[in-house]
Image (cartoon, rainbow, N blue to C red):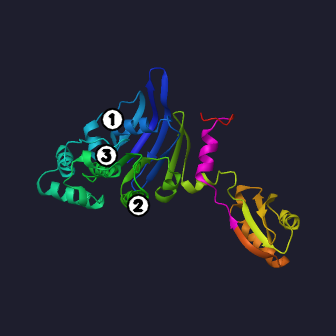
């Protein structure tokens, strides 16, 4: 549905986006991640046709955005940052206007309004003016305009910004549901949101794509990913570490806390090939040695650990 090749955007001498490429198919929900100023919003604005690219190519639905901009934009729903709207209009009036400029008329317009009002939980504010709404409700209204034409491609910049925890959960459910048959890109700084909704994530930094994979595969690049946390009683930390350290495939074992009754160690595998296998070996060891296990689990890694590590310079300062 979306093909982006070697995308570049320059503002004067600054390259805000520098050679970004990716493809996105129907059924893909892509989390677009990066520090502030990394080039996320600029990339999405180019994909929607909101701003022109300096070089590269973008096609949506098999159509080049430079050759058929209007046809491409018919396929796209766009929720930009700050959720802009016409504050003097009522919610219903604004959504009717958005339907009209999308060419939706008559009974189809009523059906579209009813659908997005229900989907975005706007029934209680439909007759209020937009400028009387809370930030969360204004954001819902702008989310509703982005999907009023039931687009095949949905591009959203911080879709849950300003929402309370319940509203964020509602929006995540909507995105996940729509992602079953659409191509969706959304930027966020909430990494748990990516894990909850996305089957794909891209991390961009200084205008360059530096990671592109599933959230689970990216998490495996965390420093603690694949390590096994073991808690046992009736054995010293030193003895527990020594027993585990003798297992094939173990690189090192470190103490990881505990109390007077039990001790906790963390075992690291020698290779990523051991991911998920080391815990089984330790379990078998515990059985054979009659160790009293209290906890045994493989650390899956954390997205935020990977994000911080690859978007920070060697000096420890943000790029």
Dot 1: element: loop
Where is residue 123 shown, x and y percent of the image? 24, 60
Q: Are marks 2 and 3 in contact (CB under 8 Å)?
A: no
Which residue is labeled 3 in the image? Answer: 76
Quadrant of the image containing the C terminus? top right
Image position of 311 (left or right of 240): left
Residue at x-position 26% and y-position 41%: 71
Dot 3: element: strand
Where is residue 196 shown, x and y percent of the image? 49, 59
Residue ranking furthest to the front: 132
User: Would residue 306 be counted in the magenta stretch?
Assistant: yes
Q: Earlier in the sequence, mark 2 or mark 1?
A: 1
Q: CA distance from mark 1 to mark 3?
A: 11 Å
Q: CA distance from mark 2 to mark 3?
A: 27 Å
Image position of 63 (left or right of 218): left
Q: Nearer the viewer, mark 2 or mark 3?
A: 2
User: Would residue 233 be counted in the magenta stretch?
Assistant: no
Residue at x-position 62% and y-position 41%: 310
Vertical relation: 308 (above or below) 315? below
Vertical relation: 104 (above or below) 255? above
Q: Are marks 1 and 3 in contact (CB under 8 Å)?
A: no
The boundaries of the magenta stretch are 297-313
Mark 1: few/some/many CA within 10 Å (<14, 14-19, 20+): some
Which residue is labeled 2 in the image? Answer: 166
Q: Earlier in the sequence, mark 1 or mark 3?
A: 1
Which residue is labeled 1 in the image? Answer: 50
Q: CA distance from mark 2 to mark 1?
A: 31 Å
Dot 2: element: helix
């Amino acid at each position: 549905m979306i093909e982006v090749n070697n995308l570049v955007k320059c503002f004067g001498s600054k390259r805000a986006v520098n050679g970004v490429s990716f493809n996105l198919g129907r059924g893909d929900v892509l989390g677009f991640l990066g520090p502030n100023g990394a080039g996320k919003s600029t990339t999405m604005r180019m994909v929607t046709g909101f701003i022109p690219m300096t070089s590269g190519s973008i096609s949506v639905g098999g159509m080049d955005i430079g050759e058929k901009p209007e046809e491409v934009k018919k396929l796209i729903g766009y929720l930009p940052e700050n959720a802009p709207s016409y504050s003097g209009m009522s919610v219903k009036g604004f959504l009717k206007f958005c339907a009209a400029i999308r060419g939706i008329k008559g009974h189809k317009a009523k059906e579209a309004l009813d659908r997005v009002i229900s989907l975005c939980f706007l029934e209680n504010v439909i007759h209020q003016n937009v400028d009387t709404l809370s930030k969360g409700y204004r954001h819902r209204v702008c989310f509703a305009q982005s999907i009023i034409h039931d687009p095949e491609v949905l591009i959203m910049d911080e879709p849950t910004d300003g929402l309370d925890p319940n509203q964020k959960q509602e929006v995540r459910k909507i995105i996940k549901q729509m992602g079953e048959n659409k191509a969706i890109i959304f930027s966020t700084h909430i990494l748990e949101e990516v894990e909850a909704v996305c089957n794909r994530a891209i991390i961009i930094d200084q205008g360059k794509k530096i990671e592109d994979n599933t959230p689970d595969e990216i998490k495996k690049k965390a420093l603690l990913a694949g390590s096994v946390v073991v808690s046992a009683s009736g054995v010293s930390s030193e003895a527990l570490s020594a027993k585990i350290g003798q297992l094939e495939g173990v690189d090192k074992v470190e103490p990881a806390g505990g109390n007077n009754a039990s001790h906790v160690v963390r075992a690291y595998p020698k290779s990523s090939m051991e991911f998920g296998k080391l815990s089984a070996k330790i379990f078998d060891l515990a059985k054979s040695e009659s160790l009293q296990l209290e906890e045994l689990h493989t650390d899956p890694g954390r997205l935020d650990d990977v994000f911080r590590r690859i978007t920070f310079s060697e000096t420890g300062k943000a790029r």
